[in-house]
Amino acid sequence: MQAYRAALLSFHDDGSARYEPDGLLVVGPDAAGRKVIRAAGAHAALAGNYPGVHVTHLPGRILAPGFIDLHLHFPQTDVIGSPAEGLLPWLEDYTFPHESRFSDHAHAVAMADVFLDELLRNGVTTALTFCTSHPHSVDALLEESERRGLRMIAGKVLQDRHSPDGVRDETEQSLLDTEALIRRWQGRARLGYAITPRFAPSCTEAQLRGAGELAARYPDVWIQSHVAENRDEIRWVHQLFPHARSYLSVYEDFGLLRERAIYAHCIHIDDTDRALLRASGAAAAVSPTSNLFLGSGFFDYEAARRAGFRYGLASDVGGGTSFSPFHTMLAAYYVGREGQTKIGVSLAPQDLWWQHTAGAAQALGLEGVIGNLRPGCEADFVVLDPQATPLLARKTAHARNLDELLFSMIVLGDDRVVEQVAVDGVITSRRKAAAA
Ligand code: GUN
Ligand code: ZN
C-alpha cells in the first residue's frame, strides 16, 4: 500500500465538490487484488489506520481525479488551429488529408505516442477517442495505452460515403473490422472499444444498420458519433434522411441511442431530442473550444439541465483548440454565459470541474470506477500545483473558498498546473511522460 498526504478534491453524488485541505489518499489492492483507492479523507482521521504504510507528503499540492475527455480525435493532434469557414470545409481541407496519413502504420504508431504524452501532460487519464477508418490506427493507440496502463476507449471510424479516397471505408469490411476490434480490445487490460460512425452524412444506411446491430450484440461496448454541430451539416442530414424526425433520431432509428452512447456537440437540438437523450441514457460530449473555434454554436446548459440527460466535457481536438481541461472548462464557462437562452448561466467552478471528472465518468457509465477520489475507484489522479505560475500563486493565495480556488486554476491554469499524474496508482512525472 502507498499513501499520499496533500489537499484532496473529490465529488459527492450530487456533483458538489468535497475539499479536504490536509488529506490522505491511500492506494492498495482490494479484496480481488485490483489496485484501487482504499481510503480518502482527513489525514488526522485516517493516518492511524495505516501504520507502516509509506506516506508521500506533498505540501501545498492538491490531489484531484484524473480528467476525463469525453470526445476527441487521436489522429487530429496536428489539425489543432486549422482555420476554416466552418465544419464541412474544415473536414475537407484539413481533417481528411491528415487522417489519410494514418494508412501508414508507422505514422499511427508515432502519433499514438505524441497523443498520449499530450493527454498525460494535461492531466487527462481517460479519453473516449476517435481513431481513423484504418483499423490499425486503433491497434496503434490501444497497444501504447496498454503499455502505459491507461484506461482508454477508442474506435475505428466508420465512413463509407461522402468521404475522399484515403479515408473512405467499405461497408461490409468496415463492420467485420469493427467486430474484430471489439473482440480484440473490449475489456482487455483497462481498455474499451467504441463503435464509431463518424456522423450520419458519412455513413450509408447499411453501415448505420450494421453499427446498430453490433451495438445490440455487444451492450458493454461504447458508441460515439457527432450530432447537430453545424447548421450546414444539419441541412445535409435532412436531405439525406428526409423521413427522420431530427438529426438525433437518425441514430435512434438505427439502434445507436443507448447507455454508453456519447454524442459530441448536441447544440442544435430541441426538447424532443433532449427527452430522447434522457430516456435512452445516451450522453452529450460538450465541446466548447471546438464550438467556439468552428463557429458551430453554443450548447444549451439550461435546457440540458431541465431535460435531465447526461453530459460532460470534451476537448474535441483537433476541432477543439487545446488538450488542456483548464482551457475546456473556461470555454464551457463562456458558453454557459453566452448560451442559447437569453439569460445565460454562470456555471459554478465545482460544476465545471465535475463535468470533466465524475460527471464525465457517469456519462460513460463508469461512475465509481474512475473520475473520483473515493474508496473503490481506480487510482488515476493528478497532483496539482496551485502556485505553478506567479499570477496563479497570487490569486490562489487570496482564495476565500473552494469555488474561488478552483476558478483561479480554471481561468489561469494549463499544463503547468499538472505537476504529476498517477495512472493506476503509479506516479509518472510530467517531465518523464513528455520525454517518453
Ligand atoms: N463531424 C464529422 N467529423 C467530424 C470531426 O472530425 N470533427 C468534428 N468536430 N465534427 C465532425
Ligand atoms: Zn469530434
Image (cartoon, rainbow, N blue to C red):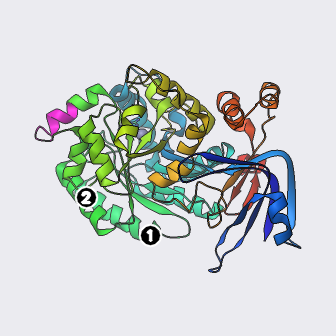
- Around disc 2, counting alpha carbons within 10 Å, would you say few (fewer than 14), some (14 to 19), or many (20 or more)? many
Q: Residue lying farthest left?
A: 243
Nearest the viewer among 358 and 35 is 358
Which of disc 1 and disc 2 is earlier in sequence? 1
> Circle 1 is placed at which residue position?
184
**Above-or-below relation of 404 to 199:** above
Q: Quadrant of residue 78?
A: top right
Left or right of residue 122: residue 242: left
x, y percent for residue 232: 27, 26
Q: CA distance from mark 2 to mark 1?
A: 19 Å
Nearest the viewer among 390 and 48 is 48
SS class, disc 1: helix
Nearest the viewer among 4 and 13 is 13
- Whether residue 241 is in magenta: the answer is yes
- Around disc 1, counting alpha carbons within 10 Å, would you say few (fewer than 14), some (14 to 19), or many (20 or more)? few
Q: Amino acid at mark 1?
A: Arg
Q: Nearer the viewer, mark 2 or mark 1?
A: 2
Left or right of residue 15: residue 397: right
Provide the residue span drawn in magenta: 236-244
Q: Quadrant of residue 25?
A: bottom right
> Circle 2 is placed at which residue position?
212
SS class, disc 2: helix
> Residue at left 56%, top 53%?
109
Residue 88 seen by the camera? yes
> Residue at left 56%, top 44%?
354
x, y percent for residue 119: 61, 46
x, y percent for residue 151: 57, 60
The quadrant of the rendered image in which ligand 1 is seen is: top left
> Residue at left 39%, top 66%?
220
Which label sits on residue 384? none
Q: Amino acid at mark 2?
A: Gly
